[in-house]
């Protein structure tokens, strides 16, 4: 397991070497939405994309053929010296398995999606950015490392930083996919919950907590996407198990107001300046000052820090446990723990990775008094 000085050495090392794409024929692995975005961006910059590789799709996209990994044409492209660029980046896609597949097909040079971001602007995508922007300064790393409660958390932090610095997909592979928000080894509360669900989506978190035996006194669920909100209110068949219920079609933020919103009917719907909808945002301190939460979950696509600021009085007064996603923006990994520490000191921090590609990286902040009673 890496120690703190090992991670500092990684931070201070030279950036990873990335194969040049200049004058090379490029094959994109993945013909989904990210693949289409990469095709448009690469072609617009004058790069040559000659094929997509995709197991489940067929046909042609903008005159670029889609071929299956088993097609003989793929091996010919590899032997011709094409560079394989991975244009898949989501929580279900194992990046190491993709790299192994491409190596097995004969590609000598492979550029992962995080590496592509270093040489070409494919847009800000969750934690992805230039290496120096998505890795913490040593002082911030030291502050967070010293606050983490267990070896799993420190290993998770070390590998998250190593992945961002080296772009090596062999890091951050010890996942706990089945226990998000109630992970083993973390003393999250499970009984008589007064639960705030920030980013309730279609009720998936509530169903997950019920499935592991959590019981509720009260639930306040916030979901600003209109399609998701309808699913939340219609499909939640176990409402009677959630105690007193407040379901609100709005998001959480630092203050109450309206913002533009990219409404997709997906879990990734988010605040966006060019969004197609306008939604209501509220500060928890203003909207539900007397709710007295015991557990707060925030998975709100980059608005987590603002939501924490908007519930500062609630956090300092009632000291609930928190589960906060820290992968939506590059600096969330170290800035959100610092913000929580300022508002709610004497709190035990745990870090867990629940999905591939640095997705579902969650900081669990458990007040010491809660940790002692549940541990």
Image (cartoon, rainbow, N blue to C red):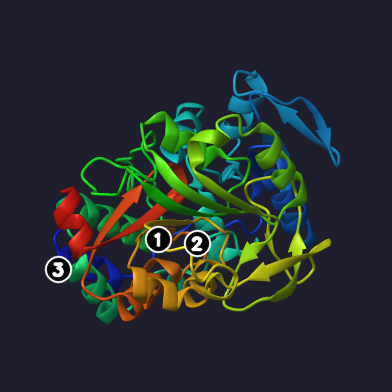
Residue found 33% across the figure and 40% down from its top: 175
Task: Report, in whole angstroms, how far the alpha carbon at label 2 lies from the one at label 1.
Answer: 9 Å
Tell which tag, 2 or 1, sits nearer the viewer: 2
Is residue 340 rendered to the left or right of residue 253? left
Label 2 residue SS: loop
The residue where tag 1 is placed is 164
* Coordinates of residue 174 in the picture (x, y in percent): 29, 40
Q: Upstream in the sequence, badge 1 or badge 3? A: 3
**Residue 75 quadrant:** top right
The residue where tag 3 is placed is 5
Q: Are marks 2 and 1 in contact (CB under 8 Å)?
A: yes
Is residue 241 rendered to the left or right of residue 276? left
Which sits in the foreground, 96 or 244?
244
Which sits in the foreground, 48 or 374?
374
Q: Are marks 1 and 3 in contact (CB under 8 Å)?
A: no
Which sits in the foreground, 167 or 200?
200
* Coordinates of residue 158 in the picture (x, y in percent): 26, 59
Is residue 314 rendered to the left or right of residue 92? left
Above or below, 98 against 248 in this view is above
Residue found 39% across the figure and 42% down from its top: 180
* Circle 1 crowding by C-alpha within 10 Å: few under 14, some 14–19, many from 20: many
Tell which tag, 2 or 3, sits nearer the viewer: 2
Can residue 150 be seen here? The reply is no
Task: Report, in whole angstroms, how far the alpha carbon at label 1 lies from the one at label 3.
Answer: 17 Å
* Circle 2 crowding by C-alpha within 10 Å: few under 14, some 14–19, many from 20: many
The residue where tag 2 is placed is 127
* Coordinates of residue 217 in the picture (x, y in percent): 43, 46
């Amino acid at each position: 397991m890496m120690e703190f000085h090992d991670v500092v050495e990684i931070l201070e090392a030279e950036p990873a070497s990335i194969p040049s794409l200049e004058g090379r024929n490029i094959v994109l692995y993945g013909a989904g939405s990210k693949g289409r975005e990469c095709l448009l961006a690469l072609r617009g910059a004058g790069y040559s994309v000659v094929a997509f590789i995709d197991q489940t799709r067929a046909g042609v996209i903008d005159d670029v053929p889609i071929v299956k990994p088993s097609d003989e044409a793929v091996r010919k492209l590899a032997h011709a010296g094409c560079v394989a660029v991975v244009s898949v980046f989501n929580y279900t896609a194992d990046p190491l398995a993709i790299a192994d597949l491409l190596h097995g097909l004969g590609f000598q040079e492979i550029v992962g999606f995080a590496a592509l971001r270093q040489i070409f602007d494919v847009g800000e995508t969750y934690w992805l950015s230039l290496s120096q922007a998505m890795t913490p300064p040593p002082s911030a790393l030291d502050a967070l490392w010293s606050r983490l409660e267990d070896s799993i958390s420190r290993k998770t932090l070390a590998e998250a930083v190593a992945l961002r610095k080296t772009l090596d997909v062999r890091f951050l592979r010890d996942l706990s996919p089945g226990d998000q928000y109630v992970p083993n080894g973390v003393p999250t509360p499970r009984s008589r919950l007064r639960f705030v669900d920030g980013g309730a989506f279609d009720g998936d978190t509530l169903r997950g907590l019920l499935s592991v035996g959590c019981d509720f006194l009260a639930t306040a669920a916030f979901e600003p996407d209109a399609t998701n909100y309808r699913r939340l209110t219609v499909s939640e068949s176990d409402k009677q198990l959630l105690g007193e219920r407040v379901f609100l079609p709005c998001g959480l933020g630092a203050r109450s107001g309206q913002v533009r919103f990219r409404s997709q009917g997906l879990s990734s719907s988010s605040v966006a300046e060019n969004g197609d909808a306008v939604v209501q945002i509220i500060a928890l301190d203003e909207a539900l000052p007397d709710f007295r939460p015991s557990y707060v979950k925030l998975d709100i696509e980059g608005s987590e820090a603002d939501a924490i600021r908007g519930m500062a009085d609630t956090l300092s007064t009632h000291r609930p446990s928190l589960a906060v996603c820290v992968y939506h923006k590059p600096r969330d990994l170290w800035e959100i723990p610092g913000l929580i520490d300022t508002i709610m000191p004497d709190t035990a921090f745990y870090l867990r990775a629940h999905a591939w590609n640095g997705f579902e990286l969650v900081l669990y902040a458990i007040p010491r008094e809660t940790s002692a009673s549940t541990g």
